[in-house]
Structures are given as structure tokens and as C-alpha cells.
Amino acid sequence: MNVSTLSTTHPTARQRRLKAIVKCLVIELGYLEYCLAEGWEDDHVQTAAVSLDTAIDCLNEHLSS
């Protein structure tokens, strides 16, 4: 594999991996939001939901640039 092939395929693989991570985070965030909507008022769960939301936003911003 030559250097030009490596440099073009590596970022693409990284982007696919990051998109997969975002998808998992969105699913987990949905579950936490469901728990909160069902009345599970826990500070740790609320903090986790906010943190996941922030992580998703940051990764999406990175992927769009």
C-alpha cells in the first residue's frame, strides 16, 4: 500500500468509526431520556444525558467539518 492510499483511506475509516460511535451514543441518550420521562429523577442520570448530548454535538460538528 502506498502513502497516498493510506492517507485517503485512513480518515474515511476514522469517520465511519466516529459515525458508528455517534449512533450508539444517540441510542443511549434516547434510553436515558426515556428513563427521565418515566420519572427516574436522578442527578447522575440527568448529568449523563447532558454529557451524552454534548458529546454527540461535538462529534457531529467534527464530522461535518
Image (cartoon, rainbow, N blue to C red):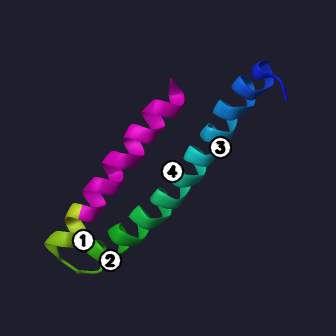
| Whether label 2 touches label 1, CB < 8 Å | yes
Q: Quadrant of residue 51?
A: bottom left
In this picture, residue 34 sits left or right of residue 17: left
- Outermost residue, left direction? 43
Is label 2 in a helix, a strand or a loop?
Answer: helix
Q: Quadrant of residue 59?
A: top left
Residue found 38% across the figure and 38% down from its top: 58
Real-space CA distance between mark 3 and mark 1, rounded to the nearest whole angstrom: 28 Å
Q: Quadrant of the N terminus?
A: top right
Residue 64 coordinates in the image, percent (x, y): 52, 28
Real-space CA distance between mark 4 and mark 2, rounded to the nearest whole angstrom: 20 Å
Amino acid type at circle 4 is Val
The magenta span reads 48-65
Real-space CA distance between mark 1 and mark 4, rounded to the nearest whole angstrom: 19 Å
In this picture, residue 5 sits left or right of residue 51: right
Residue found 64% across the figure and 31% down from its top: 11
Real-space CA distance between mark 2 and mark 1, rounded to the nearest whole angstrom: 8 Å
Residue 13 coordinates in the image, percent (x, y): 68, 40
Is label 4 in a helix, a strand or a loop?
Answer: helix
Q: In the rendered structure, find residue 16 and report the number of the disc placed on it.
A: 3
First in sequence: mark 3 vs mark 4: 3
Is label 1 in a helix, a strand or a loop?
Answer: helix
First in sequence: mark 4 vs mark 2: 4
Residue 5 lies in the magenta stretch: no
Please name the predominant secondary structure of the magenta segment in the image.
helix
The 10 Å Cα crowd at callout 3, few under 14, some 14 to 19, many 20 or more, is few
Amino acid type at circle 1 is Val
Is label 3 in a helix, a strand or a loop?
Answer: helix
Name the residue that disc number 2 marks.
35
Mark nearest the camera among 2 and 1 is 1
